[in-house]
Amino acid sequence: MYEDKTLVCKDCGNEFVFTAGEQEFYAEKGFQNEPQRCKACRDARKAASKSQREMFTTTCAQCGQEAKVPFQPTSDRPVYCSECFAAMKQQ
C-alpha cells in the first residue's frame, strides 16, 4: 500500500527516506503532512528547544553521599540520591 519516498530536508538539504512503515504510522495518527526534516535535524531541533535543567547538589538523607536533584531542596523534607530512592521505591 505504501512505498518508501525520498524527501529533501528543508534545514540541511540532504535527502532522507520516508519509509512505508513511517507513512503508515503517520496515517494511523492522522498526520496530514509529510516530515520536512531528516532525523538528525529533527533531533537537533528538539534538543535545542529543551531548556537545560538546573541541578542542585545536596546530601542524601539515607547514605550521606552527595546527590544531584532537579529541584531546590528544603530542610523540611529528606532528599535521597537516585540509588537510595530506587531502593526505597522497590520496598
Image (tube, rainbow, N blue to C red):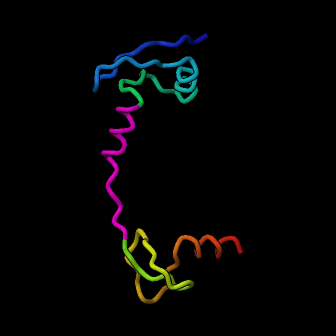
Q: Nearer the viewer, residue 57 or 27?
A: 57
Please identify the residue farthest to the front as the structure is shown: 65
Residue 84's place in the image compared with 54, above or below, is: below
Q: Which residues are magenta?
A: 40-55
Displayed quadrant of residue 72 = bottom left
Please identify the residue farthest to the bottom as the structure is shown: 76
* Residue 86 falls inside the magenta stretch: no
The residue under the point 33% across, 39% down is 45
Instruction: Give the image location of residue 50, x and y in percent.
Output: 34, 50
Total labels drawn: 0
Main secondary structure of the magenta stretch = helix
Displayed quadrant of residue 69 = bottom left
Instruction: Give the image location of residue 11, x and y in percent.
Output: 28, 26
Residue 59's place in the image compared with 38, above or below, is: below
* Residue 48 falls inside the magenta stretch: yes
Please identify the residue farthest to the right as the structure is shown: 91
Q: Is residue 48 left or right of residue 61?
A: left
In the picture, the quarter occupied by the C terminus is: bottom right
The residue under the point 58% across, 26% down is 28
